[in-house]
Amino acid sequence: MSESFTTTRMRRLRRGGILRDMLAQSTLAPTHFVAPLFVRSGQAIRRPILSMPGQFQLSPDMALEELSDMAARGIKAYLLFGVVDAEDKDESGSHAHDPNNAVCTTLRLARDAGINMLAITDLCYCEYTTHGHCGPLTQITEKTSRRKTDKFTPSKRGKSLSASSATVDNDATIAQLGRQAVLHAKAGADIVAPSGMMDHGVAAIRAALDSAGFSDTSILSYAVKYASGFYGPFREAAESPPQFGDRRGYQMDFRRDSREAVREALLDVGEGADMVMVKPGMAYLDILSAVRQAVDVPCAVYQVSGEYAMFKAAAQAGGIDEKQCVLEMMHAFRRAGAAFIITYYASEIVEWLNQ
Ligand code: PBG
């Protein structure tokens, strides 16, 4: 039955703040936000990331200060990314397996200091490889002649060496991923988050964690991750731009519809993912909504570096009310189905919510 336009007044339920609050369906609480942190080896380093105002690369000691501060302000979870000095990079990303790298050191410091936050780690190799791709490559045969510190330069000799034909070796990468996961779990990670879009990666990580006795460590899979221009500032932040080509050979094509996303998510859940993530956020609300409806595990969303940079730039230019617009965006994520949100705005949002 259709409503009569003469009696219907949609505005009745918008008349006062109490009524609007009573009817509100999406909610925001400090527990819904995860703060990403970039850590690098060294001491007393707090280096601003120019393309992401308010974000820093931190040495483990400074990261610990930042985490204590965040915990005191009510932030409940953080996501660690390692930034790697050029001399520590190689073609397979072996520094990711060094128990004294910045990520593991920070995890141990936080655990020893009793920081009461969930520790999540990004599991990938792009920060650790000379070529900047998310794992060891196939079809690179000149590696023995290249020095560790050299950037990858595609050879002009021989078809098999061309950059366009080199791609991440899926099975070699997943064989390593479990090792990185176990290292993080040992150092104190509660949740590991594989972000490389490797097929069967979640299963490999689950098996490695279980056989090392870490069956309680959760996996938050970046199950649905698009090859996106919105990661631009991150690559400065993490010093991890691909040295040739791009990531379209393994990250998803945004011209495909949500069915591919649902399939990715279901596969990862089948392999043992405890939670799945959609990334980026703002331009992918349709995807988030579809994935949320298709899986029975919690779904997260990642508001990525380029989204953060856009809000910051717009706020700086004076055109928008930063707090109002950022919170509106967060409600959109929650409405679309996000259980929690990874965002560089986490600190500011929690402050706003506590005001
Ligand atoms: C590593 C990784 C990236 C991001 C998270 N993990 C970069 C990429 O895939 O190129 C991007 C996060 C952001 O832009 O904030 N694979």
Image (cartoon, grey):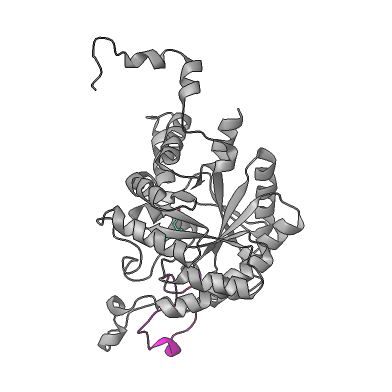
Horizontal side, residue 347 vs residue 316: left or right: right
Q: Quadrant of residue 33?
A: top right
Q: Give the magenta-colored segment's residue range.
A: 128-148
From the viewer's perspective, is 61 left or right of 307?
Answer: right
Q: Which percent across, then down, holds residue 137?
A: 40, 79
Query: At which x and y percent is residue 253?
Result: 29, 60
216 drawn magenta? no
Front-most of 146 and 162? 162
Can residue 106 be seen from the camera position used here? Answer: yes
Quadrant housing the N terminus: top left
Is 141 displayed left or right of 65 in the figure? Answer: left
Q: Is residue 197 above or below residue 57?
A: below
Q: Which residue does the image show at 64% across and 66% down from the upper left?
A: 185
Extreme residue toward the top, this view:
6
Asked if residue 134 lies in the magenta stretch, the reply is yes
* Placement of 31 over or under 262, stated as above or below: above
Q: Which residue is drawn at 66% across and 59% down?
A: 60
